Image (tube, helix red, strand yellow):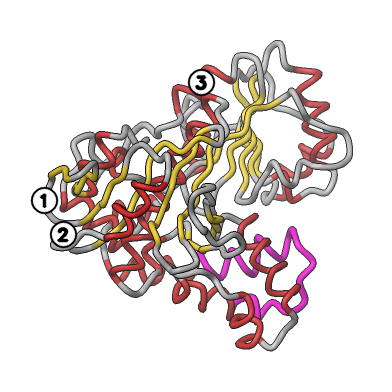
Amino acid sequence: MRKIVIRYIKKSVENDLFDRMVFIGGPRQVGKTTFALSFLPDSNERHPAYLNWDDIFNRSAILKGELPPNQKYIVLDEIHKFAGWRNLVKGFYDTNKSKISFIITGSARLDYYSKGGDSLQGRYHYYRLHPFSLQEINTTPTRDDIEMLLKFGGFPEPCLRSEERFWRRWQRERTQRVIYEDIRDLENIKEISLLEMLAEELPNRIGSPLSVKKLKELLQVAHETVERWLNIFERMYYCFRISPYGPSKVRAVKKERKLYLWDWSLVPDSGPRFENFIASQLLKYCHFMEDTEGFRMDLRFLRDTDKREVDFVVLKNDVPLFAVECKTGEKTVNPSLFYFKQRTEIPSFYQVHTGKKDYEKNGLRMIPAHKFCKELHMP
């Protein structure tokens, strides 16, 4: 079993806690609680400075405004499930900010659920904690690391155990909890069984422009309902969607979006799963740059009306940095890369694969995935 000690955002969070609260959002069971507990002396859930809203005794103390004494850090877990959490946290912080650092964690978009009411703006920094990436698994990642991550995903428990039976049971339990606990607590959804059906269908929709029309026909609900459910899944960090990039010299599509899962191991087919894996690595890179450096990052894809496509384009402050095509094989180069290289201002093009070949041709880099992540300093 592999052992991972320090998560990639640890140093940045330590620095930010000197003058702000830190909010940590991310998927259920991605390691938020374990990460937050690493700031406490005993690093366990029995520490008095760890207050979980789901614990009835902790909940009572929180509502009474009772904080444990003589603590440098206090962790408030899943408190966003309380309707009035914004004002409550604001009061804790304003009263104690000179002596206590607060870490707020939750399995939903805390920035979304902090809107409205008394604003917390200026009192916190927000981080999105991602599943393990290649660089976290191994500072000198190998093809074996990729195979392991592709099979078991990047969530700590199944990744570190690397046992297929455990992975299957963990997946089933996690999906049930996301739908029947997290979404139930935060959203007004009556058709919960249809939401579960949608969650089971999404892994089959990876890699191609997502058709909401086909999903509404499958579920027999309105277009607006499917769109609302997809937005809920995004807020719960179950999936994410990316929009097209439309440079002026290319007849690029404008409205289509592509969907990916935060847990790529759910994707059944190897090609789409690898594409989802790279999408997740790139999204993690974008979020890290936004959360730590303040840049405006964006992950897009490039597709024109003649169906030429490159899987991903990464932008920084609206300026393209590089484009990435994903292939499990290494024999052929996607001709769309050369086509778009001649017609766009994207400076670097990569074709990332699971093989061994590493070379450059006409400005295109053919590169193994583990080398790609290392050279671009993916977190």
Q: Contact, CB < 8 Å: mark 2 with mark 1?
A: yes
Q: What element carries label 2?
A: loop
Q: Can you say whether 193 is above or below 40 in the image? A: below
**For residue 14, which numbered disc appears in the image?**
3
Expressed as whole percent of the image width and height from the top left, the position of residue 309 reads: 40, 61
Q: Residues within 10 Å of mark 1 (few under 14, many from 20)?
A: some
Q: Identify residue for label 2.
A: 330
Instruction: Give the quadrant of the C terminus.
Output: top left
Q: Do the residues labelled 3 and 2 touch (CB within 8 Å)?
A: no
The front one of 345 and 136 is 345
Label 3 sits on a secondary structure element that is helix
Assign the magenta stretch its main secondary structure.
helix
Horizontal and vertical percent position of residue 297: 53, 37
Q: Which of 271 and 95 is in front in this view?
A: 271
SS assignment at label 1: loop
Residue 185 colored magenta?
Answer: yes
Looking at the rendered structure, the kind of residue marked 1 is Lys
Residue bearing mark 1: 357
Other residues around mark 2 within 10 Å, as few (<14) / some (14–19) / many (≥20): some
What residue is rendered at 51% in x and 63% in y? 258
Q: How far apart are marks 2 and 1 (CA)?
A: 7 Å
What distance separates the C-alpha of mark 3 from that of mark 2? Answer: 41 Å
Q: In this image, 217 relative to 65: left or right?
A: left
Q: Nearer the viewer, residue 365 or 116?
A: 365
Which badge, 2 or 1, is on the more N-terminal residue?
Answer: 2
* Image: 270 above or below 356: below
The part of the image, by quadrant, that contains residue 70 is: top right
Which residue lies at the image location 72% right of the left edge and 50% below the top edge? Answer: 56
- Residue numbers of the magenta segment: 174-196
Disc 3 marks a residue whose amino acid type is Glu
Counting from the top left corner in percent of width and height, residue 346 is at: 40, 40
Mark 1 / mark 3, whichever is N-terminal: 3
